[in-house]
Amino acid sequence: MTHKKKRSWLKILGYVFLFLFIAFIILVQIAGQFMSKSEAAQQKILETSGLAFKFENYTFQNKNVHYVQVGFSDHLPTLIFVHGSPGGEDAYLDYLCDVSLAEKANMIAVDRPGFGLSDPKHPPKNLAEQSASLQAILERNKQSPNILVGHSLGGPLVAQMTMDFPDLVQGMIMLAPSIDPELEPAIWWRKIVNFPLLSWLCPRPFFNSNLEIMNVKPDLEAMLPRWKNIDCPVIVFQGGEDGLVPKENADFAVAQMPQIEVEKIMFPSEGHLIIWTQKEAITEKVLQFLNLF
């Protein structure tokens, strides 16, 4: 290769790197627009429901964990909402403001460590540690049935919690859960985001999300022999056109828990955001599910 051609290739590579760098900056700036709402912003929305609520915090491994609770009845079950990645407790505000749900259950939505209003630094490294970080919520509400609700990466997390704390979980609802290790995609750019410069430029929730998704496959593999131990009622909701979590994950859930009758509910033409696009249908089914407790 001549010196002139070599310079031309270096120039092209420089342009490619510049393009990728600019695209990355744009991506993280867009991601920054979807950061969790402040407590004050959530409060304004929750106040429109007329329901009693409060914000709470507790400490896990010297780090703050934040959550919001709606309803405080000792004789009602508790719905505990766990968000995906990235995300926050505010993902469930429409459910927390739903009076029909509040009549049948207390409700809690939590900011997982590393997200929302919880401590952003050094989040749990795997699903087992994340599960342990949320045990305190289960313990605080053990006087009534705890029903876990998890969307996307929150799906395998609520499953992990059900496996880890079977005496504290009485029901499980998974929304578009990424639970089959064989269906986890290998995305090359996730490792690039961990490079020092790019990780420094990333909004913290985006970086934390990338790290936990990149490491989730071995966690799912470790869970494989434990699905058979789940013995509480389970519902799985799934979009048939989900481009992020393949619909076959719902079939995986049914196949992994033959010891119970897993109810699978498909929305054939929906994508990954069924938590919002199918809120009414999901709420109706959750209300029926609550009659079991």
Image (cartoon, rainbow, N blue to C red):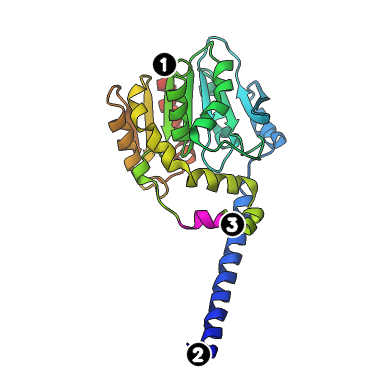
N-terminal of the two: label 2 or label 3? 2
Q: Residue at x 64, y 24 (%)?
A: 50
**Position of residue 149 measured from the top left corner of the image (x, y, whole percent):** 47, 29
Q: Residues within 10 Å of mark 2 (few under 14, many from 20)?
A: few
Q: Is residue 168 magenta?
A: no
Count of marks, rendered view: 3
- The image shows residue 212, relative to residue 21, as above or below, that is above
Q: Quadrant of the C terminus?
A: top left
Q: CA distance from mark 2 to mark 3?
A: 32 Å
**Position of residue 255 measured from the top left corner of the image (x, y, whole percent):** 28, 32
Q: Is residue 191 magenta?
A: yes
Question: Badge 3 is on which residue?
Answer: 195
Question: Badge 2 is on which residue?
Answer: 2
Looking at the rendered structure, which numbered label has been put on residue 203?
Answer: none
- Secondary structure beneath label 2: loop
Q: CA distance from mark 2 to mark 1?
A: 77 Å
Question: Badge 1 is on which residue?
Answer: 291
Q: Which residues are magenta?
A: 188-193
Of residue 141 and residue 5, the one placed in the foreground of this image is: 5
Residue 48 visible in image: no
N-terminal of the two: label 1 or label 3? 3
251 on left or right of 273 = left
